[in-house]
Amino acid sequence: MPRSLSSSRRGGWLPVTAALLFLLLAAPAAAGPEAEAALFYEALAPHGKWLLYGDYGPVWFPTGVPAAWRPYVDGRWVPTPMGWVFETGEPWGWATYHYGHWLPTLDFGWVWVPGRTWYPATVVWRSSREYIGWAPMPPPFFTPAPAFGGGAFLIGSDPFAVLTPFFWTLCPVTHFLRGFGTFWAPAHSYGRCGCLVPVSGVTVLLPHTALVTHFFALGPRPEGCFAFGPEFRFLSQVTAVPVAEFQRVAQSFTPARVQQVIPPAALLEQHPHLREVVPEALIQGQPLPVAPVTDTRQAAATFLKADAAPRLTRLPTLPPDLPRAVTVPFASRVGPEALKGVKGAELPAAAVNPRLAPPPAPPPAPSPPPAAEAPGETAAPAREAPPLRREGPPGPREAPAVRREMVAPRGPAPESGREPEVRRRPRMIEVPPVTPAPRGETAPPPRPPAAAVTPEVRPPGPPPPSVAPPRPEGVPERQQAPPPARREATPERLEERVREQWEQKLRRELERQGRAVPPAAPPAVRERQKPRPAPLKPAPAEPAPPPGSPGGGPPGWAPQPRRGR
């Protein structure tokens, strides 16, 4: 190698090395969880508390909220061209519902892990024809505690498998469109609707819903994708709202109209570094362009990616004395009482509909106590099943052996607290062996065990016929009167029965009023008083017309009998 070339190379490395060292030392710490937390530390500190939690670094959770507070409950979902956006009156909604991730903890309730990429919402959706559900997406490599229904999950297999029923909020379709098409009001919040499914009912209803897989990517940052939410066409089928109305309302809800989509203008002036994480189009009041993601693998790998936005150049300083959380191990918080007293384990009472909760499970039936054995007696061991007979050449028969069994005698029960002094020797009972049948023949069925002789109990029979006493001589035998003839049901008889019933009713009414009751007429009088029909008289015969008159015949004519046709 020529000396000039070697010296030029040796001298060329020095400027490059110096430039790299200068860039590394001069570049700000614009990556990592601490840098992303520094973006929102000053803006969110008045509304909550920051601390270091496990491997997630700085996290934040709101203070001054009820114990049953949960994210994505105190607000409503509104349609926009970018998807469904959560509109709320909470002053921290512009940050916690569009950046980073939420995760539940046993010690502090729901905590927020910051990120630097803006999304319309950081949730996953499920839907059916009766319910629509959403769940906050936890950060990558998150494993829920056993108290939240967690278990063993394969890293990288399915990012949505960690969303146990504890994460989900279910709302009936009829109450999903709160204040549809109108400006925000606190009355539109799901936290005051009294319509959400209680946490205990989500476990029952969630398997009847399906995951909504409509993923979209923002135009400026295609490296990350989000869930658009329920399609307008689907909601039109289950709510009877036309698709054109959904599109019209979505176009009218610009980022400037929706509450807590971007930081307020006063907050941007106070903390100008927030402009680096807010897209400029949203600040100007224009929606961001979106594009569908058809590859499900790509969508799962880039879903709500927190670092999809470019790195930051100017950051405030994060306080170095953040408190570190002291957590309770998961192993000590298991069982049905593990969530007792945990913040955010239930929904607010004003948000749920108690009628949607499953009925309480009936208490388990108490098992019967084991039967007490009398002293001196032992339970007989269960007899083993006879061994299976193997097919093969018959071997030499052996002499049948006599099988003997031990039978403990039953004696009087000993006194309590004392053992029997004299124990009887068990007697031996010889049981004849079972001789196997030769090959090719069918063994006769075993004889059933002899049943105990039970005295026959017969039902009592009919009483013996009564014997009439002997009749003395000279006394004629008594003739029995024939049974009265049954009267036929004629119209006259029915009329008489109705009259008798009416007279009885009239007599009871007169007796109740204390008035005189006329005596009933005897049957003979009734028959006399009964009107009889007049006898039918024969009609007078009409004289025959004379011959030759109209209607008559010719002279000498007589009517002839008709012949049958």
Image: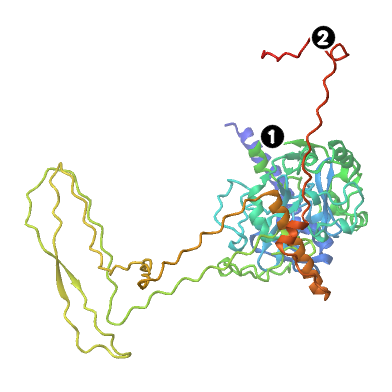
Q: SS for tag 2?
A: loop
User: Does the rendering let one see residue 213?
Assistant: yes
Look at the image and tell me in which quarter the C terminus lies.
top right
- Where is residue 447 drawn, in percent x and y? 21, 56
The spot of residue 500 in percent (x, y) is 73, 61
Which mark is on residue 21? none
Label 1: element kind: loop
User: Looking at numbered disc 2 in the image, what kind of residue is underneath it?
Assistant: Pro
Quadrant housing residue 520: bottom right
- Of the image marks 2 and 1, the number of the one nearer the N terminus: 1
Residue drawn at (13%, 54%) of the image? 435
The residue shown at (89%, 39%) is 248
User: Does 319 sit above or below residue 251?
Assistant: below
**Which residue has dot 2 on it?**
555
Q: Is residue 111 visible?
A: no
Q: Which residue is drawn at the image coordinates 77% and 70% (left, top)?
A: 519
* Pointer 1 residue: 294
Q: Nearer the viewer, residue 72 or 1?
A: 72
State whether residue 419 is above or below residue 483: below
- Identity of the amino acid at label 1? Thr
Q: Residue at x 52, y 69 (%)?
A: 365
